[in-house]
Image (cartoon, rainbow, N blue to C red):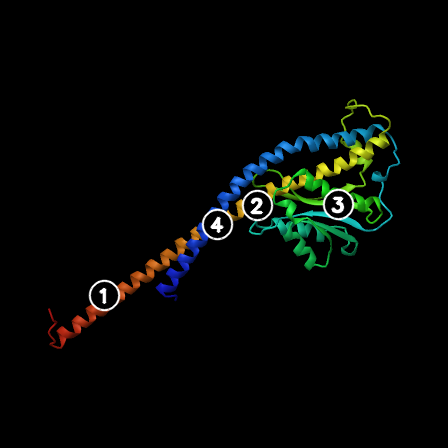
């Protein structure tokens, strides 16, 4: 059985850890509220951009455009968004598993990593890290998304990669975050057409749909990447808040259990001391020893 000193030392250690996890939970809660508001404000732009591209593809028939067909290369660019820090439950590992369990062969994947945790996991598993933009996840802005998209689109235009994918965590609500792997390019004209509701076009395009796509699809890709960055930050803080809340609750349960063990050990020690004193007194009285006053 552990001694009182060991129990007290462990209890004090867990109390210190519990204070840290509680503070981290509060910090994550504040960051989550900020990130959630930012995600909600950027979503209408991403939705409208998707509707615009869908509208063009649905109403223009067959268009022979470089962004609508896969390239000749078997290589696939995968933009992977994770966090730079841990202590967020399964947030980072879920994205890594999404990549490793996908239909994209390891030897054909070029990883464009946003977030050190995901990069480290995929690097250990043998994936080729083509570029690292980990600093962009700290405080994402549209300029960061555009820089990433320019590099990936340039690789697609040069025939270095034949397809572009995006792996990130969708922010559903405070407690629900869903890892998702989507294809950005080539854009599926048929799938996009199914998303339209048959309403009239939002606008007219001049001089042609092809030239409009040259301008709009890069913006469309950038808007999706930027929206994914914002949602990933919100999901990360939500996951960390839950993880720290769970850790704090576990720490409180362990402290309660250790306090009970400590009190029992203390009571047993007191009882033993009293038993020894009483036994010694009885012995002296029995054999005629006078108990000093």
Q: Is residue 182 visible?
A: no
In the image, residue 205 above or below residue 241: above
Residue 259: image quadrant is bottom left
Q: Which residue is mark 1?
A: 274
- Tags 1 and 2 touching, CB below 8 Å: no
> Considering the numbered disc 2 on the image, is that residue within a helix, a strand or a loop?
helix
Frontmost of labels 4 and 1 is 4
- The span from disc 1 to disc 3 (Cα, nearest Å) is 74 Å
- Tags 4 and 1 touching, CB below 8 Å: no
Q: Which residue is mark 3?
A: 165
Which numbered disc flags the more N-terminal residue, 1 or 3?
Answer: 3
- The span from disc 3 to disc 2 (Cα, nearest Å) is 23 Å
In the image, residue 9 above or below residue 200: below
Which numbered disc flags the more N-terminal residue, 1 or 2?
Answer: 2
Figure quadrant of the N terminus: bottom left
Left or right of 216 in this view: 62? right
Q: Which residue is mark 2?
A: 239
Label 4, residues with CA under 10 Å away: few <14, some 14-19, many ≥20: many
Q: Is residue 139 visible?
A: yes
Frontmost of labels 2 and 4 is 4
> Considering the numbered disc 1 on the image, is that residue within a helix, a strand or a loop?
helix
Left or right of 211 in this view: 89? left
Q: Which residue is mark 4?
A: 21
Among all residues in the image, which is located at the extreme bottom? Answer: 287
């Amino acid at each position: 059985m552990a001694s009182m000193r060991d129990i007290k030392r462990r209890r004090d250690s867990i109390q210190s850890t519990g204070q840290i996890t509680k503070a981290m939970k509060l910090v994550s809660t504040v960051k989550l509220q900020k990130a959630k508001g930012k995600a909600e404000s950027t979503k209408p732009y991403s939705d409208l951009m998707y509707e615009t591209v869908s509208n063009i593809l649905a109403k223009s028939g067959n268009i022979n455009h470089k962004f609508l067909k896969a390239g000749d290369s078997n290589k696939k660019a995968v933009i992977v968004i994770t966090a730079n820090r841990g202590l967020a439950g399964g947030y980072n590992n879920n994205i890594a598993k999404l990549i490793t369990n996908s239909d994209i062969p390891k030897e054909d994947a070029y990883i464009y990593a946003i977030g050190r945790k995901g990069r480290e996991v995929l690097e250990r598993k043998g994936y080729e890290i083509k570029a690292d933009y980990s600093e962009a996840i700290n405080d994402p802005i549209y300029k960061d998304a555009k820089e990433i998209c320019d590099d990936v689109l340039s690789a697609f235009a040069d025939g270095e990669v034949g397809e572009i994918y995006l792996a990130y965590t969708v922010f559903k609500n405070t407690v629900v975050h869903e890892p998702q792997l989507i294809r950005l390019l080539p854009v599926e004209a048929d799938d996009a057409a199914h998303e339209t509701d048959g309403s009239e076009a939002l606008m007219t395009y001049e001089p042609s749909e092809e030239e409009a796509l040259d301008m709009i699809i890069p913006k469309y890709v950038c808007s999706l990447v930027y929206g994914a960055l914002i949602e990933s930050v919100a999901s990360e803080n939500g996951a960390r808040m839950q993880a720290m809340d769970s850790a704090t609750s576990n720490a409180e349960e362990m402290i309660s259990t250790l306090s009970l063990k400590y009190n029992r050990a203390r009571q047993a020690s007191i009882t033993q001391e009293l038993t020894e004193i009483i036994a010694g007194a009885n012995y002296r009285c029995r054999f005629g020893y006078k108990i000093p006053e």
